[in-house]
Each structure stands twice: as C-alpha cells, then as structure tokens.
Image (cartoon, grey):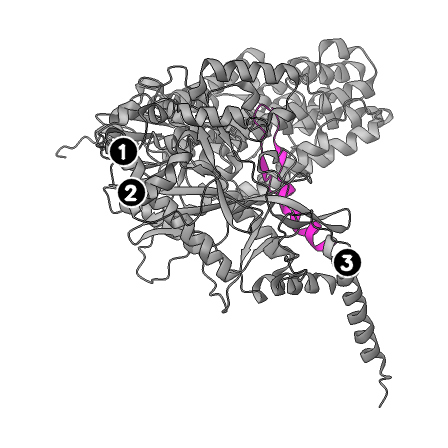
C-alpha cells in the first residue's frame, strides 16, 4: 500500500536528507595518508560510536547543529572562560571544538590501566629520589640526570611529606602513534593543569547536545573530583581541614581554571601574599586574624614557593613555607620537587625502572628518548640528528630555540641550527634526542565540514586509599595544522571534550553529599584579607563609575534642553564640566574642545584615569582576583558593560548618543547593584563590597556638594545637585516652596532617611563595622570603630545652615580617613599580621 500521508512523507524526506548529509560528511572526509584516524579505521569502516554521534547531528535541521553549539558556547564568552598565552597581556576566549573525542570502553580500559601504572611508578621514583636514593647509588639512574635541573629541590631530601604522600595528582600527555598504540609524550607531576577546563568543556558540550550526551552513556567526571577532594582532606591533620588552592594570581595562564576548581571543590583560592608561616604552620590572613591552612594544592612552580630558601626574586610564594613543610605543619600537593619527574632526561630510563620497581613492563610506552649526558646516547643522537627532535633535558632552562618544545633541525633557520649545535657541544647534558612520533587524528568541524586534525590527550589520575584512580575523560587539544608530528601542536589549537563511553547506562553523580547526617551550617568561613580588599575596591570603582555616568548624563541633558533652563546657564554647565575634569574623567586639554568630544572622552578614553571605561576596567580587574566568589550573572554583566564601552573613543557622538550610552551603562550598573543586594549572602564579603560603595558615595556626594552648594549657589546649581544624587522627587514632595539652599544641604548631607545622603552612608557603615570580627575581645574599640564614632558625631550634630564648603571638606576627609583605617585593619597586613587573641576573665 503506498505511503501518502503528509506526515509520513515528511519524516521519510527528513530521514533521507539526514542520511544524505551524513553520507556527504563521511565521503568528504580524507584522513591523512599513513596516519591512524578516529573516524576511519584501517579497513575503511567508521566506528559505531562515531556513526551514532554524527547520525544524530545530521538529523538536526540545516544549520541547527551550528546554532546549538553557538548558543552553548555563549556561556564561554559571557562567563569569561579564558586562558592566557605566556607573555600576553590580555586573556583569550577559550577555544572549544564542537566535536568531542570519543573513546570506547575497551580502549579506555587500556589507557586507564597504563596511566594508573605510570602514576604508581612515578610515585615510587619520587619517594626514592628524595629518600634513600637507591636508584642512584645502585646505578639505575645517573646522578646528573636527577640533579642537573632546577626542579630537583635539595631541601626536600629526607623530608617525609605531611599526610604520607608526596603526590596526589598526576597527568600524562598521550598520543596515538602510527601503529595504533597509545604513547606517553610527557609526564605532568609538578602542578598538572587542564582538569578545570575539562569540566568546562563537558558542561558546554552537554548543554549543546543534552539528549545525545545522555543517550551515549558518557561516563561522568564528578566521581574523580570527589575522590581527589577526599584524598586531600584525608591527608590533613584535622577532621574538618581548610584546603587552599595556591595560585600564582590573575596573570597566571590558567587563572580562570584555578578559580573554577576552587569554587567547584569548595577550596579557598589563595595567593602567596594571603599566607604567612608561624612556628612551622601556615596561616591564611583573614579579616578575623590568622587562620590555619591545613592543605595547599600547589599551582605555583616549586622554585617560586619560598623566596627565603629558593628563588629570592619570587613574589608568588610564602616566606618560610619550606620550613613548614619540613616540620610537617602543612600538606602540600604536589610536593615541592615533584616537578623533577617531568624531566625528559629521565624518560629513557623509565622502561628499566618499571621492571626494577614494579616487576612489569610499561603498559604505555613513552616516546623513545636519548639523553645526551651519556656518551653512547650522545653519539646516537649526533648520528641521527637530522631525523630526531631535539628538546631540553630539564624544565625551565636550556636553549631558547627549544622554549616552545622539541624542534627538528630542518625546521630551524641556519643561525638557529648553528647556535643549537654549539650549545649541544658545550653542554650536552642539557639536551635529549627524541623519536618523532606522528599523532593519530580525530575529526574537527571547520568551514562546515569534517577535517582530520592531530590531537594530544591529557589524562589525570588521583591518589586514593585504594590506589590511583583515573579520570574517565580528560583534556584534549586538537591542532589546527595538518602536520601530525607530536612536536607541532601550536597556539592555534582548540580544546575538545573527551567522551569515554560505557556499555551500560551511567549513573548521574554530582559532588553533592549522599548522606543525611551532614552537619548544617549557616556560616561562610573567614574572609581572606585579599578578598576583602578586592571586594571593597570593587564597590568603590562601581560607585565611582556610576557617579561619573550621572555627571555625563546631566551634561547631555543640559545641552539638549537648555531652552528649558534645566541647567543651561553657562556657569552651572562650566561647573559640571569642571567636575569631570577634576575627577580625571576628561583630560584638561579636551576641556576646551567640542562637547561631543568631551562626552566621548568621559565615557571611552582609556588614557584618562577617571573615565568610565577605565573605572569599569579597574572593577573588572578587582573582580578577576576573586572570580570564585562572584556569580556567573555578575561576571557576565560586568564583561558586557566593559565590551560596550571599550574601543569607542573615536566615535562621533551627538548629545543624544552620549545620553543613550550613559543611560545604558547606568542601567547595567543598576543591575549589578541589584544582583549584589538580592543574591549575595549577608556575610563579610557582601559587607566589604557595600562598605566600598558607601565610602565612595559619601566622598563623591561631598565633592559635588562643595562645588554646587556654596553660599552663593544658584537655583540651577542646586537643581543639578539634586539630579546628581537622584533626590529630585524626594525634595519636591517635601518642599512646595521651591529650591532653597538650606533644605537642599540637609537632604544631601544630613538626612538619614535619604539613601543618597552622606548621613545614610554613615549609618550603614556603622552597622557594617559593628558586624565585623575583632582581633581582641577586650572590649576596646578598634581604630575603624573609633574613626567611625568621630565621623558619625560630626554629621549627627551638624546643622544644615552651617554646612559650608570647609565643613563639608572636613567630613570628606574623615570619610577618606575611615577608608584608610579599614584598609589598615582588615586588608593584607604584611609581617604585622597576628592571630586572633581571646582574652578571658571573670565578670
């Protein structure tokens, strides 16, 4: 019977179109000659997992695949998912491929077993080299291969790590060679990065293709991170330890990842300045004094962790940290000196060490490597120098030509070749020769088609009480070049999610506790001093930007409506422009130019320290230093506001254009204020953010007051003042007689019920300070409280009729003094930081 129902015909036609699209993708796919490929097997067939995945994508209507991925990757831009190339000043948007790397359960089992074995071997070698060093004394390893690099930390010899383990996290960079076997290209034992980006990759892909992700039984990542967190917690001395992630700071290449992991795992993100060593123990500087740090997950290279004993030029470390490590006062993961195992000089010895220490061959062989510190290996490298890749033997030192990784002589300029050969002759111990492995390829989506791209897979393992556990997935880099040599992975590489499939349905697991006996808490812990500092200044920058925008808005409206005498008199307009110049929003040289240029400069001039764009950039930098404490919505709004203001200095603006931009920015700032008011917990962090706002608002109001509410102020001056502090409606509802100097002064400065008045800011600041912790419970007020009492008394006892310019300036100076007192008490105190003192006594 013929099929003539329209809906059936539509389904048949859709299915035919999908099959044609899939056939077109596969027929147009051309693997690189002689290189294994994930999509096309040696016999020309395509694995079922890939057929299923691509078949599902082909069923989407034309263009929907790209639209779905574009929608999901908006999260990358909006949330500020970024990375930094070494030497760059600016962060780059995270480059994610829309196609995952798909690995079957059987293949993954082989990879997992090999990585687990290698982690076990690495830990055994590390324990020996910093312990009895029998591998050297018995001749299994040359001493120069161990001590030749800066990653060998002599101060750790004989030190038993607190918690019993020297290494809690290991990673291996893997590639698949021409024979189809997986090879280890590099070991990562110092501070393995990328696991946080693996989480982000998974979130974006699962959002783009949720049905497909669940239907293909992709194994979850959460159990791995749960085991890693438990491993660090179990290593501590206390039942409820404080675990910190030690970061190099916002200019680190992977700072976003560090902040993301700290938030995801519930760790405290700290920098070296946040920590201090006292009597063999490590403490975090908080607003409540020094608080014990039990575990440090180190993302700072070992040479930089202690400027007293290691690199004296380091600004990233903690003076005395090595002393605390030797005393067992803190667990450090991975142990200082573990980066030694990343040395390529050791690679050639690992196969024999595996037999010696584990009694078995390596399940995942590493790239054949010959260390030039041995005469026979050096001669072999010299004979084959045109076919081998030359690399640094040790990390962090060596010939600059090899700074980006292994190179072949054929790829170098004549001058570089000559320089490299001379260096190899002078110090052969600094070099290795390596076999050039060609990587297998995986499909990547480029220009609307599937293209084969070489890839490197980083796989992670964490130490647990039951041995090493491997993350079912990892961090994959996909090259944008057709060159499949393992040494050619460049800066243009994309990241890809890694889908390890299971033959059975996968249980949905998260990091949420699965017990009902978890102790209920309503506190957020002690706020680190650096976070308090950044939150305080974030509030100040945002409030200062708002005040500047209000000046710009009033300037535009004055010019547009001068006939109605809004503030159209020349003297008032001159004062308005003078305030923008005084605040640094506009350079004095611009003051005499066209009004459009003046407004554009105030909004967009990145060379003026007080312009709106500079203030928003300062706010973004302050926020970036504590990204783990801010919501995704807050960060998204802040980045969007910066992008709307940036790079528009040369635009030709009318007064209407300037007004529209100022009002749009004010609306964005209002949204940010609403988020902080409605969504942030009322703990110390929120208080410091709000205190920054209140101090800045009070200071700005005083400055405007001194300019526009002098004894000879005109009606236009006072009307403008009410506009700038958003109090027109309040004033007109109270005073029907019209605008007069004394009631305006009272409303602006002394009215505790007006949220824009100085008095209101002081009342709010007083409440915030009363809620903050004290260092000593001796009943004596601390300096900020004393300053606050003096300031409050000046305002509460003032009379509006006496508020001349000098009295207003005195209140402004007291507010600035209060800001300094808050900074001296609660922010980073350097060597003066002291623990909280509890003084007891009988009443």
Which image quadrant for residue 7? bottom right
Which label belongs to residue 356?
2
Residue bearing the label numbered 3: 27
Q: Which residue is mark 1?
A: 135
Q: Quick check: 22 above or below 570?
A: below
Q: In terms of secondary structure, where does tag 3 sit?
A: helix
Q: Tag count in the figure?
A: 3
Q: Quadrant of the C terminus?
A: top left
Residue 285's disc is none
**Residue 192, visible in the rendered structure:** no
Q: Earlier in the sequence, mark 2 or mark 1?
A: 1
Camera-side residue of 168 and 694: 168
Q: Secondary structure at mark 1?
A: helix
Does residue 625 appear in this view?
yes
Q: Nearer the viewer, residue 438 or 660?
A: 438
- Please report the bounds of the magenta region as a residue range: 67-95
| Residue sticking out furthest to the bottom | 1
Look at the image and tell me in which quarter the N terminus lies.
Answer: bottom right
Dots 2 and 1: beta carbons under 8 Å? yes
């Amino acid at each position: 019977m013929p099929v003539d129902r329209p809906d059936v015909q539509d389904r048949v036609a859709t299915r035919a179109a999908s099959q044609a699209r899939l056939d077109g993708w596969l027929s147009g796919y051309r693997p690189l000659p002689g290189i294994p490929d994930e999509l096309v097997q040696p016999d020309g067939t395509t694995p079922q997992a890939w057929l299923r995945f691509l078949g599902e994508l082909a069923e989407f209507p034309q263009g929907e695949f790209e639209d779905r991925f574009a929608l999901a990757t908006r999260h990358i831009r909006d949330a500020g998912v970024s990375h930094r190339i070494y030497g760059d000043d600016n962060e780059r948007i995270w480059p994610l491929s829309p196609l995952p790397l798909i690995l079957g359960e059987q293949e993954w089992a082989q990879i997992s077993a090999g990585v687990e074995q290698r982690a076990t071997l690495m830990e055994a070698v590390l324990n020996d080299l910093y312990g009895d060093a029998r591998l050297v004394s018995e001749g299994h390893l040359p001493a120069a291969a161990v001590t030749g690099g800066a990653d060998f930390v002599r101060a750790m010899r004989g030190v038993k790590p607190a918690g019993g383990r020297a290494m809690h996290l290991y990673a291996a960079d893997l590639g698949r060679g021409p024979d189809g076997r997986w090879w280890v290209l590099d070991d990562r034992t110092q501070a393995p990065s990328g696991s946080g980006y693996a989480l982000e990759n998974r979130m974006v892909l699962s959002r783009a293709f949720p049905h497909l992700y669940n239907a293909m039984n992709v194994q979850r990542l959460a159990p791995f991170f749960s085991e890693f967190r438990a491993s660090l917690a179990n290593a501590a001395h206390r039942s409820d330890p404080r675990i910190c992630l030690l970061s190099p700071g916002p200019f680190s290449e992977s700072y976003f990842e560090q902040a993301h992991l700290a938030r995801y795992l519930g760790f405290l993100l700290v920098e070296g300045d946040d920590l201090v060593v006292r009597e063999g123990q490590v403490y975090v500087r908080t607003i409540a004094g020094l608080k014990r740090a039990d575990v440090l997950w180190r993302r700072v290279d070992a040479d930089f962790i202690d400027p007293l004993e290691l690199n004296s030029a380091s600004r990233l470390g903690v003076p005395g940290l090595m002393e605390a490590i030797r005393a067992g006062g803190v667990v450090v993961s991975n142990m200082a000196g573990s980066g030694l195992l990343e040395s390529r000089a050791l690679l050639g010895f690992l196969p024999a060490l595996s037999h010696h220490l584990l009694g078995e061959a390596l399940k995942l062989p590493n790239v054949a490597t010959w260390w030039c510190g041995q005469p026979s290996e050096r001669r072999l490298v010299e004979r084959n120098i045109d076919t081998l890749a030359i690399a640094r033997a040790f990390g962090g030192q060596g010939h600059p030509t090899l700074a980006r990784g292994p190179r072949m002589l054929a790829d170098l300029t004549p001058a570089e070749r000559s320089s490299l050969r001379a260096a190899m002759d002078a110090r052969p111990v600094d070099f290795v020769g390596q076999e050039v492995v060609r990587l297998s390829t995986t499909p990547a989506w480029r220009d609307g088609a599937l293209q084969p791209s070489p890839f490197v897979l980083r796989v992670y393992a964490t130490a647990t009480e039951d041995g090493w556990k491997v993350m079912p997935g990892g961090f994959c880099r996909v090259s944008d070049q057709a060159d499949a040599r393992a040494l050619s992975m460049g800066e243009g590489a994309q990241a890809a999610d890694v889908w390890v499939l299971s033959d059975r349905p996968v249980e949905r697991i998260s990091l949420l506790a699965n017990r009902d006996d978890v102790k209920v808490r309503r506190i957020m812990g002690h706020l680190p001093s650096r976070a308090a500092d950044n939150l305080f200044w974030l509030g100040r920058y945002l409030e200062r930007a708002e005040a500047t925008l209000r000046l710009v808005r009033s300037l535009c409206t004055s010019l547009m409506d001068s006939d109605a005498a809004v503030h159209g008199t020349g003297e008032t307009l001159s004062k308005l422009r003078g305030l923008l110049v005084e605040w640094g929003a506009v350079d004095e040289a611009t003051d005499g130019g066209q009004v459009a240029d003046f407004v554009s400069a105030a909004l967009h001039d990145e060379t003026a320290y007080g312009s709106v764009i500079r203030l928003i950039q300062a706010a973004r930098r302050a926020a970036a230093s504590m990204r783990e404490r801010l919501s995704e919505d807050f960060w998204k709004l802040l980045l969007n506001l910066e992008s709307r203001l940036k790079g528009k200095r040369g635009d030709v603006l009318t007064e209407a254009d300037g007004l529209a931009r100022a009002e749009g920015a004010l609306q964005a700032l209002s949204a940010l204020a609403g988020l902080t008011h409605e969504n942030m917990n009322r703990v110390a962090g929120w208080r410091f953010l709000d205190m920054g706002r209140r101090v800045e608002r009070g200071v700005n109001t005083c400055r405007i007051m001194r300019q526009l509410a002098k004894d000879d102020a005109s009606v236009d001056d006072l009307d403008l003042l009410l506009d700038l502090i958003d109090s027109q409606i309040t004033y007109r509802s109270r005073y029907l007689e019209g605008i007069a100097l004394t009631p305006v002064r009272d409303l602006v400065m002394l009215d505790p019920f007006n949220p824009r008045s100085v008095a209101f800011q002081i009342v709010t600041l007083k409440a915030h300070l009363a809620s903050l912790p004290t260092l000593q419970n001796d009943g004596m007020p601390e300096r900020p409280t004393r300053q606050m009492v003096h300031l409050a008394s000046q305002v509460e006892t003032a009379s509006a009729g006496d508020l001349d310019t000098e009295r207003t300036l005195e209140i402004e100076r007291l507010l600035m003094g209060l800001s300094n007192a808050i900074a001296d008490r609660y922010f980073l105190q350097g060597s003066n930081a002291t623990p909280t003192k509890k003084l007891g006594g009988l009443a």
